[in-house]
Amino acid sequence: MREEPRRDFWVGSFVLLGLAGVAYLSLSVGGVSYRGPGGLELVANFDEVGSLKNRAKVVIDGVKVGQVKSIELGKDFRARVVLDVDGRLALPSDTSASILTAGVLGDQYIALEPGGDTDVLKSGDSVQFTQSAVILERLIGKLIQNLGSGDSKGSKK
Amino acid sequence: MSPTGAVSALGAWTLGAVRDLGRFSVFSAAVANAGRRPPLRLRRLVDEIYDTGVLSLLIVCVSGFAVGMVLALQGHNTLSRFGADAQLGAVVGLALIRELGPVLTSLLVAGRAGSAMAAEIATMVVTEQLDGLRMMSVDPLDFVVAPKAFAMILSMPLLSTLFVLFGIFGGYAIGVVVLGGDGGTYMSSLEDAVEFSEDVLGGLVKGTVFGVLVGFVATYRGFTATPTSAGVSAAATSTVVIASVATLIVDYFITALWGV
């Protein structure tokens, strides 16, 4: 069996190319390592998370600063969402978190609204003020209810 | 044919199928065993990877690009009806990574390399080269079959990955360059939708499983070919048929059982 350097080179290139492809798919597209600079782990309790998913983005003023790490049901029957946020951020301790929807049909994400407190949130702290996801069906239900009751009173307008 | 005759024929067919399946399993186990026994025969493996992997590169990449282009075109037509053009990257990427990449690569490689593999081994059976090896007390399973089967197993996930990548480029070419979508939106919807553990890993597992299927089916059909020239062509044909059908059926079960 004679050595064939050219053939070896091609096989080596093929394997390298394939592995590079796997790495690209896993790291960049699959987001196995995309965390941005994480490090600050915050807990936020919501009454309703809607269809929030793991790895949903966390934004401040629309700028992505982290992602959702886990969603589970807490002991007090509220949804306990752990956020992984850029560790360099010094977020005031009265920062609030709300679940918003990108567009009408888009994914849900969490928006943080920094407050004015001088104390800073540390890893493991929980966000005090939260606003739950808006469920469209409930909103419409309420709207119909209010319209109905508005008709019966009739005097307000 | 009398009713008893028909039942007997069915029985004979079933027994034949079970016997074939059993032989295939024993053969696969023997090949896997031969592959991990020293000597490792790395040189043989490299040569076989050249034949199955490197020489299949062109057809796999071109096909991947074309499939990506048509996915983007079809996806664009449907998505734009709902004003969801921004999700084009997610559609193209998920379809390629989870399904089309591994399955189409397996079908292509079964046709290009699997049939050649079966025909080559079958020709060695016809010309008694395998018997020649046995006379020199070289185990043909170890020297001829195992490197071919393992080359297929190693090449398939890599080829499938490249198929996916070229598909994503193809989708980009149509969705962004031709149809004038936004490149950043395409890539970010792709990156948002694809998850490593569910999608990418699942695609790799599928690719590897299909590599095992095609590799073992091709070598088995070649190794057990009837030693005639018709036997060689039958081995090549049945390799493509069995490997393709098995790929599609196994793909369904992988998806149904593990949700990949």
Image (cartoon, grey):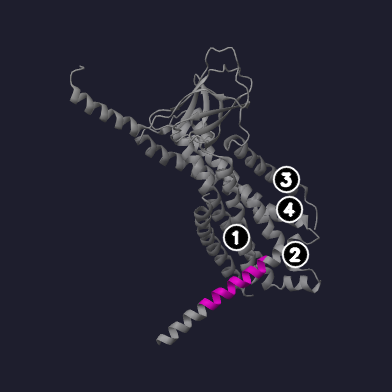
Q: Does residue A86 appear to the left or right of B145 in the view shown?
A: left
Chain letter for mark 4, please. B
Residue position marked by numbered label 2 in the rendering: B142
What residue sits 77% from the left and 55% below the top?
A: B42
Indicate which label's residue lies in the foreground, 3 or 2.
Answer: 2
Residue position marked by numbered label 3 in the rendering: A12
Where residue B24 appears, as percent x and y from the top left, is: 62, 69
- Determine the secondary structure under disc 4: helix
Chain letter for mark 3, please. A
What residue sits 28% from the left and 28% below the top?
A: A143
- Mark 2–mark 4 distance (CA, rounded to whole Å): 15 Å
Q: N-terminal of the two: label 1 or label 2? A: 2
Three-letter residue code for mark 1:
Leu
Q: Residues within 10 Å of mark 4 (few under 14, many from 20)?
A: some
Indicate which label's residue lies in the foreground, 4 or 1.
Answer: 1
Residue position marked by numbered label 4 in the rendering: B46
Q: N-terminal of the two: label 2 or label 4? A: 4
Q: Give the range drawn in magenta.
A: B14-28
- Mark 1–mark 3 distance (CA, rounded to whole Å): 24 Å
- Determine the secondary structure under disc 1: helix
